[in-house]
Amino acid sequence: MDFKITTGNFANVNKYRRAGYHKVSIALSSRYYTGDRFKPLMPDWKYMQAEQEEYTRQFNNGLKKLDARKIGNELHLLSQGKNVVLLCHEKEGDFCHRQLVAKWLEKELKIKVEELGRMGGKTSKPIQFSLF
């Protein structure tokens, strides 16, 4: 592939835009987001409230029905060759279907799908107080 596919969340959308990534929502709802949406990688409402194990099973079953090469080609066309960031709501580190998508794409396309996260933003570290 001559472009990168990455993942991230809506909270960092402006950072991704400034970095030149083509933003693509794979969330079922994205109320204030006005960019591209990519339905084939969205979860299904019918299992949205399922426990994580069941959600994962059903979502992965849906991915098995897709052709990863075709998905990659569609994302390439949608982004006009720019690097893509697949977006949803969950913050970095929380369970999310974009993690499942990333693993699937990595396996099927033999590529690395990076989580962009905050893109250099400071992460908070726990504060350690001294007793003395």
Image (cartoon, helix red, strand yellow):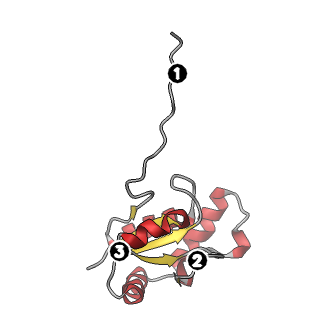
Asked if marks 3 and 2 touch (Cβ < 8 Å), the reply is: no
The answer to whether 54 appears left or right of 3 in the picture is right
Q: Nearer the viewer, residue 37 or 121?
A: 121
Residue at position x 62%, y 74% in the image: 43
Instruction: Pick the residue in front: 130 or 108.
Output: 130
Q: Quadrant of residue 90?
A: bottom right
CB under 8 Å between discs 3 and 1: no
Residue 98 higher or lower than 34, as above or below: above
Q: Secondary structure at mark 2?
A: loop
Q: Amino acid at mark 1?
A: Phe
Q: Which residue is mark 3?
A: 20
**Position in image of residue 92 (x %, y %):** 51, 55
In the structure shown, which secondary structural element does the residue marked by tag 1 occupy? loop
Contact flag, marks 1 and 2 (Cβ < 8 Å): no
- Residue 84 on image: x %, y %: 39, 76
Residue behind mark 1: 129
Q: Residues within 10 Å of mark 2 (few under 14, many from 20)?
A: some
Name the residue located 49 percent from the left edge and 78 percent from the top edge.
Answer: 24
* Residue drawn at point x = 33 percent, y = 65 percent: 112
Q: Would you name the residue on which mark 2 appears?
A: 33
Comes first in the chain, label 3 or label 1: 3
- Gap in Å between the C-alphas at discs 1 and 2? 41 Å
Real-space CA distance between mark 3 and mark 2, rounded to the nearest whole angstrom: 17 Å
Image quadrant assignment for residue 69? bottom left
Q: Specify whether 69 is left or right of 90.
A: left
- Give coordinates of residue 61: x percent, y percent: 57, 72
Amino acid type at mark 2: Tyr
Q: CA separation, marks 3 and 1?
A: 41 Å
Instruction: Relative to 35, say whether 113 is above or below.
Output: above
Identity of the residue drawn at 52% across and 21% down: 129
Mark 3: few, some, or many residues within 10 Å (few <14, many ≥20)? few
